[in-house]
């Protein structure tokens, strides 16, 4: 698990040189964008329970067989496990977003996830769909495009640093895509 600073030091060390030029400019840019990154992580983390429950509910609405007897979200203990797994995935995506590095997501969350889900009989299509819904929710929070019309009475307006967050939203989306790919 490396953050942007550790990665720059290791790269410079491998070249037996110092951090300078392009590496230093990249670190300065990373620091300059830090408030946006922190606001994005805060927006996702502050709404994690709602995002996960909405994603699982959306997944179930699209496949009601999941809550029928024998379904993967039946009985309550399986539903609780599904919600727990969604929160774990979302937590590691936010860690990756905070660090600007997907290795924490790969090492601590995705390594062996598909095999575990296959062994438990968890349908990958439903899992991928829940991740896609969480991705849409997270991107809406990062880009500050979540609206009261979409969220209803659970709408929470977040104060965020103004500016273009499209690259940060794209980075977060890539982490969710990474999870979906690992599950497929």
Image (cartoon, helix red, strand yellow):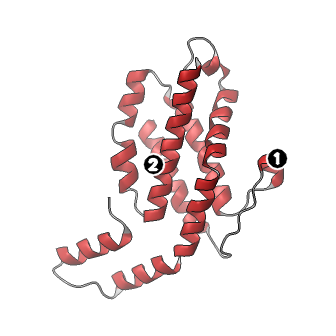
Position of residue 15 measured from the top left corner of the image (x, y, whole percent) = 18, 78
Q: Nearer the viewer, residue 52 or 63?
A: 52
Q: Residue at x 24, y 71 (%)?
A: 10
Q: Mark 2: which secondary structure?
A: helix
Q: Tag 1 or tag 2, which sits nearer the N-term?
A: 1
In which quadrant is the N terminus drawn? bottom left
Tag shown at residue 153: 1
> What is the crowding at mark 2: few (fewer than 14 residues within 10 Å), some, or many (at least 20)?
some
Q: Is residue 7 above or below residue 69?
A: below
Q: Quadrant of the C terminus?
A: top left
Above or below 71: residue 173: below
Query: What residue did someone put label 2 on?
Result: 178
* Residue under the image location 39 percent in, 33 percent down: 114
Residue 142: name its quadrant. Answer: bottom right
Q: Residues within 10 Å of mark 1 (few under 14, many from 20)?
A: few
Q: CA distance from mark 2 to mark 1?
A: 31 Å
| Labels 2, 1: front one | 1
Q: Is residue 12 left or right of residue 173?
A: left
Image height of 33 relative to 96, above or below: below
Residue furthest toward the top?
Answer: 69
């Amino acid at each position: 698990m490396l953050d942007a600073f550790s990665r720059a030091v290791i790269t410079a060390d491998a070249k037996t040189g110092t951090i300078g030029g392009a590496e230093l400019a990249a670190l300065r840019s990373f620091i300059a964008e830090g408030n946006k990154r922190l606001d994005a992580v805060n927006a996702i983390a502050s709404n994690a329970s709602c995002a996960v429950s909405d994603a699982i509910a959306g997944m179930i609405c699209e496949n009601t067989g999941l809550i029928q007897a024998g379904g993967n979200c039946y009985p309550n203990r399986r539903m609780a496990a599904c919600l727990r797994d969604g929160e774990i995935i979302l937590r590691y995506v936010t860690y990756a977003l905070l660090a600007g590095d997907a290795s924490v997501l790969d090492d601590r969350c995705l390594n062996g996830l598909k095999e575990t889900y296959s062994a438990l009989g968890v349908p990958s299509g439903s899992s991928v769909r829940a991740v896609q819904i969480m991705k849409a929710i997270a991107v809406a929070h990062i880009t500050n495009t979540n609206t009261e019309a979409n969220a209803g009475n659970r709408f929470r307006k977040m104060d965020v640093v103004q500016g273009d967050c499209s690259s940060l939203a794209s980075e977060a989306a890539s982490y969710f895509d990474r999870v979906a790919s690992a599950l497929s």
